[in-house]
Amino acid sequence: MVRKATLNDVKQIFEVIDVFAKKGTMLARPVTEIEGSLRDFFVFEEDGFICGTSALHICGPDLGEIRSLAVRDEFTKRGVGRRLVEACLAEAKALGIKRVFALTYKTGFFARQNFHVVDKITLPQKIWGDCIKCDRFPSCDETAVMIEVK
């Protein structure tokens, strides 16, 4: 089941993200950062165990970013990621956000969710504040994808 994250989830959210951060496929999120942005986070929980996580970060009056989308390997191919994205998009719609983007290595996954590839240069400078924390900055090799929220 997908639900909003609580403080009790922080340790497991960190663990899920950290696996991918160590592989170099996701930006690391320290526990303090997860706590500080906890209201952005959703979790997919099964029997008290966090199987996956995502966050919707508001970047401006009509733009949001899906970040920290991660699913434990043993739960892939079960619709967990799709449901986390759907939760982020539903919240974006409720908040009045018109466009949602993500930076990703998994363009096929996002294409199946009706996102389309966009040039990173079209994204606001505001998002690059996170990028400076990345080992790959300034030579980002992620692809930007976007969807219009309806």
Image (spheres, rainbow, N blue to C red):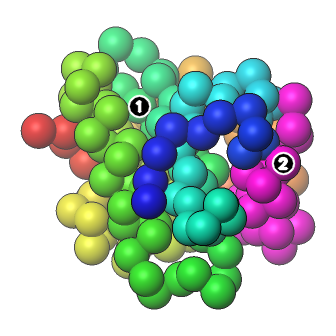
Circle 2 or circle 1, nearest the eye: 2
Residue nearest the viewer, comparing 68 with 45: 45
Q: Is residue 49 left or right of residue 77?
A: right
Q: Residue at x 25, y 48 (%)?
A: 147
Residue extent of the magenta highlight: 11-32
Dominant secondary structure of the magenta stretch?
A: helix
Amino acid at dot 2 = Lys
Q: Given the image, on which type of amino acid does mark 1 rest?
A: Gly
Residue 75, position as x, y percentages in the image: 57, 81
Residue sitting at 45 percent across and 86 percent down? 77
Estimate the x, y position of residue 70 in percent, counting from the top left. 61, 63
Q: Quadrant of the N terminus?
A: bottom left
Q: Are marks 2 and 1 in contact (CB under 8 Å)?
A: no
User: Few, some or many C-alpha atoms within 10 Å of disc 1 (few <14, some 14-19, many ≥20)?
Assistant: many
* Residue 11: mark in rendering: 2
Would you say 113 lies left or right of 71 here?
left
Q: On the rendered structure, is 150 left or right of 20?
A: left
Q: Determine the residue located farthest toward the top in the rendered image.
A: 61
Could you tell me residue 65's position as x and y percent? 47, 38
- Residue 100's place in the image compared with 79, above or below, is above
**Image point (56%, 67%), residue name:** 46
**Whether residue 146 is situated above or below residue 32 in the rendered picture:** below
SS class, disc 1: strand
Above or below — where is 149 with respect to 109? above
Label placed on residue 64 = 1
- In primary-sequence order, the first of circles 2 and 1 is 2
Residue that lies at the very extreme toward the left in this rendered image: 150
